[in-house]
Structures are given as structure tokens and as C-alpha cells.
Amino acid sequence: MYNFRTDLAVERNDIYKKVNNIQSEIDGIEIENESREETDISRVKIINEDGENKLGKPIGNYITLDVKNIKLADDEKIEQIAEVLADELRKVIGEHVTDTEDILVVGLGNMYVTPDALGPKVIPHIEITRHILEYMPKVMPEDTRPVSAISPGVLGTTGIETMEVLKGIVDNIHPKLLIVIDALASRSIERISSSIQIADTGIVPGAGVDNKRKEISNKTLGIPVIALGIPTVVDLASITNDCINLFIDNLQQKAMSNSYLNELKEKDNYEEIKEALIPKDYNMIVTPKEIDKLIENMSKIISKGINMAL
């Protein structure tokens, strides 16, 4: 299988088509696009094993919201994006549980590593109701959904696999569905902290940067798992590939026409670039210098979106 080096299904679809020179839709994959409130929405549905094998993602739904200039977003813009996210998330949740069934929100990642801190930063802003319904039920409306949340840390600081922590929690408090928040990897510099993916197939933490941990999914936990992620990092080979394309664009504008440059741009050069970088261990994982502000804004969008949806 092709090494996609991205967690986003919409990117994997584009990469597969480019590598295999496919102009039409891929067999086993359904795509639907929509624009709303200055947000581009792409819905990728993997419908069979053929599509699953081609994209290296389980059968299911992958919704990507693309927004721009997040680092400049004011409170009004953040609220607007959160509402779009809430609508999409609400639909996905509704396919798996009723309006009043228990949900556990999980913030994956390392609080002390900024590009990986999205999950832990979202959790304090989730509106928790489970304990109130248990100990003071009369102060809440009868149709209130029990919501609990946890940020389990990472293996490097706890010595415990995230899956092991979550299995213990699920077996004890019996939620009906998990919403898991995590930082993702992308193959495009344009998508860093500008895309939000909702997937109803669970998640394999670290898969986008070749650091796979144990899968968190219905298969491993016995309940539906919705993964909500944002790309915060990209590897150096991807950046180099993007920069080459930008360089070729500039040359083409000046030269008007050049068959070699056209041919070079049509090809995905990622694998060749990676092979040149890896022997000297230069294929670094890169994040923007504004990552603190981006994580702050994205954590607000995610927490607000989840609260609205629940």
C-alpha cells in the first residue's frame, strides 16, 4: 500500500488519484462537496473493502471542514466555524446513539508539546454533566445527556497505552459512544490547523507520523468511536514537495510553457524526496511558528462545536 503520510481521507483520495493517474472517482469511494459559511466541506465515504484497501482507511464516513486564516479568527468567526462543526458532528452522533445516551469525550495528546496539545486543551472546556445527573439530578432538565471527559496523557509520560486507559474507563462507566480528539498529520502545508476531520471509524494515534499506537475503535472498545482531528504537523518531504510545486508554478508563469516542468509537477515527488532525506535523518516533522495561537483558536472551535452538538 502507498505510504500516504497523512491522516486525512480527503488527502489520501487525492494522492491515490494522482499516483494512479485517475481522473474520475475511485471505485469504492463516494465524494460529496459543499460550501457553507466560508467553510468548504468534503464528505468522503468508503463503501467497501476495495475502497478501504486503496485509501488504507476503514469503511466509514470521513468529513473534512476546510477553513482559512484561523490564526486571525475573532470570536465571531470562531463561533461561526463551531456551528458548522456542530451540525456535522450532530448528524454523525445521531447515527449511532440517541439524544440522551452517555458520551465520553477523550482528549488525546501531550499537554507539554504544543502541536500535540489539542486534545488536552479541549477537555477543560467541555460541558460535563454526568456527575451532576448522578448526584443532583433535579437541577438538570430531564433530557440532559450525561457527558464525561478525560485526557489520559501519552505512553511516554504515563507508561500506559491510551487504549488500556480507555478500556478500563469504558468497562466501568459504560458510555455508549466516544468522541476522541487528536492532532493529525497532513501532506499539505495549506491544511495545517486549517482543516477539521470527523471520522466515525475511530483512530490509530500516531499513524500519520509512523508512530502507530493501539487502535481506538468499535472493534477494540465495543462501542462507536468518533474521531475528531486537526492537522498540526507536516513532514519535511511533504513541505519540500509543496515548495517544488510552488517553485514550478512561478517558473511556469514566467516561461509561459515548459513541457518538462509540466511533467515534473504532474508527478507526486514525495517518495523520491523522502528517500533523499531519510538516510541523514532529515525528514523532520514541522509545525508553524504560530502554532500556539492556532492551537488556542482550534481548541475553542472544537470545544464549542462539541458542546453545541451534545
Image (spheres, rainbow, N blue to C red):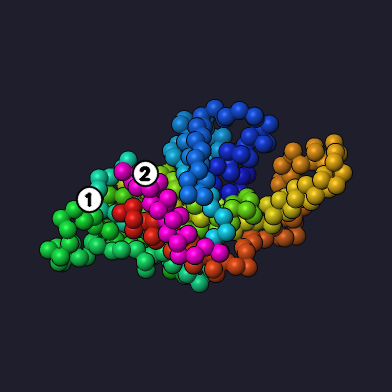
Across the whole image, how many numbered discs are drawn on residues? 2
Residue 72 among magenta residues: yes
- Kind of residue at badge 1: Thr
For residue 92, the mark is 2
Residue at 68%, 36% (x, y): give it. 19
Q: Which residue is mark 1?
A: 100
Q: Are marks 2 and 1 in contact (CB under 8 Å)?
A: no
- From the top left corner, tell me how far across and down residue 97 is, in percent: 28, 45
| Residue interval drawn in magenta | 71-94
- Kind of residue at badge 2: Val
- From the top left corner, tell me how far across and down residue 165 is, in percent: 36, 60
Residue 39 among magenta residues: no
Residue at 72%, 50% (x, y): give it. 241
- From the top left corner, tell me how far across and down residue 222 is, in percent: 32, 46
Residue 135 as seen in the image, left or right of residue 170: left
In this rendered view, identify the residue nearer to me: 299 or 162: 299
Q: Secondary structure at mark 1?
A: loop
